[in-house]
Amino acid sequence: MLRNKIIIAIVFPLAGAGCIEVDGSDAREDVSIAVEDASEPLTTKSRDKLFKLTLTKASKPYELSAISVDVGLPGDDRMAVNFEHEDANGDGKLDQGESLICAEPPVNIFDPSSEGKTATVAFAERRDGILVQVGTTTWKL
């Protein structure tokens, strides 16, 4: 039913506009993600390694071409980040237990002044042209 859904528009600078659909009635999938800090400090330049996102619980594998990871501080727009896949089984999909090493895009999102703040990290899958959020967590910078 349409009345049970909330559509949230999110702006991804440099990546165009996107939409994340949040199902207001029940969870379609059982997904959990966790993040671990990158070992390198944040700088005032772009492309800093930010965190390692691990798919800790999933009902299915995810095609890399269909997923998006975005991050943002409260009150700021969330931005899509770049990622590299740590593919343990070589199948080209993000499976439960596998990770993505996430880094800033060619735009500096975070710098040393961001340290100590808490950001929201969202994991989404593209379905029929719409990004559907399937997991979220927080990351303490």
Image (tube, rainbow, N blue to C red):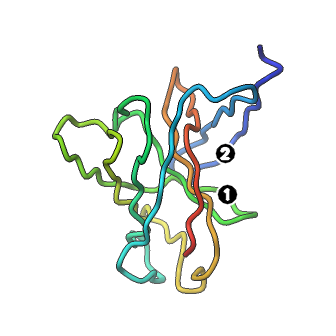
Compared to residue 55, the image places residue 30 above or below, namely above
Residue 69: mark in rendering: none
Q: Are marks 2 and 1 in contact (CB under 8 Å)?
A: yes
Farthest-out residue, left: 90
> Percent from the top left, x then y, of residue 53?
42, 56
> Percent from the top left, x then y, of residue 32?
51, 45
Q: Is residue 117 left or right of residue 7?
A: left
Report which quarter residue 94 is drawn in.
Answer: top left
Please rate how many residues cluster around mark 1, counting C-alpha atoms within 10 Å: few if below 14, some from 14 to 19, many from 20: some
Residue at (41, 83) in percent of width and height: 41
According to the image, label 1 marks what residue? 77
Residue at (51, 52) in percent of width and height: 80
Farthest-out residue, right: 3
Please rate how many residues cluster around mark 2, counting C-alpha atoms within 10 Å: few if below 14, some from 14 to 19, many from 20: some
At label 1, which amino acid type do we have?
Answer: Asp
Report which quarter residue 76 is drawn in.
Answer: bottom right
Q: Is residue 40 left or right of residue 9?
A: left
Q: Quadrant of the N terminus?
A: top right
Q: Nearer the viewer, residue 97 or 45?
A: 97
According to the image, label 2 marks what residue? 10
Q: Is residue 94 left or right of residue 51?
A: left
